[in-house]
Amino acid sequence: MWNMAKPSKPAPLEKKPRRAARAAGLASFAPALFFSASGRVVEANASAAHALGVKPAELEGRTLAALGFQTVNEKGLRVKEALHPWIRAARTHRRVGPVVFGIQGPGRPARWFQAVCAPAGSRKAGGWAVAAALDNITDRIHFEKRLAAQLRYEDALTSCVAQPLCAAHSC
C-alpha cells in the first residue's frame, strides 16, 4: 500500500557546501593542504600539521615561509616560493606532480614529501585554490641516501682491491 502522507520537509542545504566537502576530504590519514593562489594555507588536516610539527590552526591563513619553513629540492638547495608546486598549480590551472621536495622547519631537519597539487575552485568563486596531497617519504629518502653511501663505499673498496690484482695478473 502506498503511503499518501505529506512528504517530509527536505533538510536545509548547508551554507558552505564546498568547505564541508573539503573538510570531509581532509579528514583522511594522508597529509592534505588547501592553498590560496597566493600560497597561503586555507585549510590543513591534522596529518599535514603533524607532519610539519605544528597545529592546524597555526597553518591556516599563513604561508609556509611566514611560519619559518623553507622548501628545498632533492639536492638540499632552497626552492623559490614562485616554484612551489602549489603556486605553479594555481598559476597554470593544471595539475603539478608528483614532485619531491623537503620542508625544513626552524630548528628541525627536513621532512621529505612527494606531492600532487591540483587546482580547485574558479575565478568567480573568489580565486583559484589548490589542493595538495602529500606523501611523507622522509624514511625512504634517508634509506636511499644510506644505500647510496654504502654503494660508494663498496665501489671504493672493490676498486682498491682490484687494482693490485689486475697489476699482478695483467688484466
Image: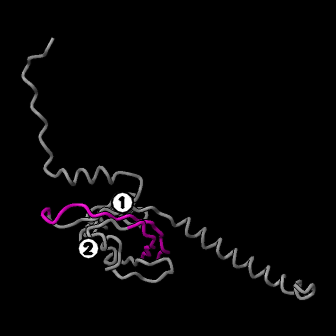
Please indicate whether residue 125 sits to the left or right of residue 82 in the image: left
Whole-percent x, y for residue 37 in the image: 23, 71
Image height of 12 relative to 65, above or below: above
Q: Residue at x 65, y 71 (%)?
A: 147
Residue 119, quarter of the rendered image: bottom left
Going from the N terminus, do you reach mark 2 or mark 1 first? 1
Q: Residue at x 18, y 50 (%)?
A: 17
Is residue 95 in sight in this rendering? yes
| Image marks 2 and 1: residues in contact by CB distance under 8 Å | no
Please indicate whether residue 140 sits to the left or right of residue 24 in the image: right
The secondary structure type at the circle numbered 2 is helix
Whole-percent x, y for residue 61 in the image: 24, 69
The amino acid type, in three-letter code, at marker 2 is: Arg
- Extreme residue in the top direction: 1
Residue 32 is marked as 1
According to the picture, the residue beneath numbered tag 2 turns out to be: 91
Whole-percent x, y for residue 121 in the image: 21, 61
Residue 66, quarter of the rendered image: bottom left
- Extreme residue in the bottom direction: 167
Number of disc labels? 2
Is residue 53 in sight in this rendering? no
Whole-percent x, y for residue 9 in the image: 9, 31
- Considering the image in quadrants, where does the N terminus appear? top left
Q: Which residues are magenta?
A: 97-125
